[in-house]
Amino acid sequence: MPETMPGHDATRTRPPYNPLINLANAKPVLVEEHLEENQHIFLTRPYLGALLFENAASDARDHCANERTFLSWLRLSMYLGIVSIALIISFHFQTKPSGLERRMALPMGIIFWMLSLVCLGNGLANYILTVKKYSRKVALVQSGWKTQMTVLVVGGVILGSCVVLLVTDAQKY
């Protein structure tokens, strides 16, 4: 049981409210208490409470790896969003964009924006599914075809865009 602060009730197990750590001042959700319920772990009350898992074996390492994977998907999504914005506003520092480049900028920007949203959704869905499986103590093997297809499509679009941009740049000279 955690130590209590002087002057506080001895049965109190939560630290005092800190808006930087717990913005909603919500109690944490002890996942062990909700194992038998059929409700999704993210829909247990309080909704904004932190999920507390029992740290047995390599659980902490697995949770941290899952969070790092989500953050990698988030980073990829942000990069694709930045590329889409750069394509739409046609960054050129020395020359003006050609007519062909201006016509291609909006469709390519929309494609990259949609890929950005797909990557964000894929990362979030993977994170939520993995946490749900961790809460049910289900063995987990990460080899999803959706993730592989998303990476393949993103890589293909990036490669195709590079080819298109190189071909249009070669036609200028």
Image (cartoon, grey):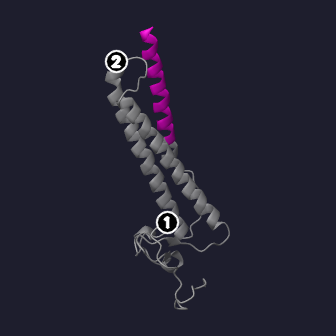
Mainly helix, strand or loop, the magenta region?
helix
Q: Nearer the viewer, mark 2 or mark 1?
A: 2
Q: Can residue 145 be spotted in the picture? A: no
List x then y, in percent, for residue 25: 42, 74
Q: Is residue 171 magenta?
A: yes
Density class for disc 2 (Cα within 10 Å; few <14, some 14-19, many ≥20) is: few
Give the residue type that dot 1 points to. Lys
Residues drawn in magenta? 151-173
Which quadrant is home to the C terminus?
top left
The residue type indicated by label 2 comes to: Leu
Q: Residue at x 40, y 17 (%)?
A: 95
Dot 1 falls on a residue whose secondary structure is: helix
Q: CA distance from mark 2 to mark 1?
A: 48 Å
Front-lying residue, 29 or 20: 20
Q: Which residue is mark 2?
A: 100
Q: For the point 39% across and 30% down, which residue is it?
A: 87
| Placement of 30 over or under 118, stated as above or below | below
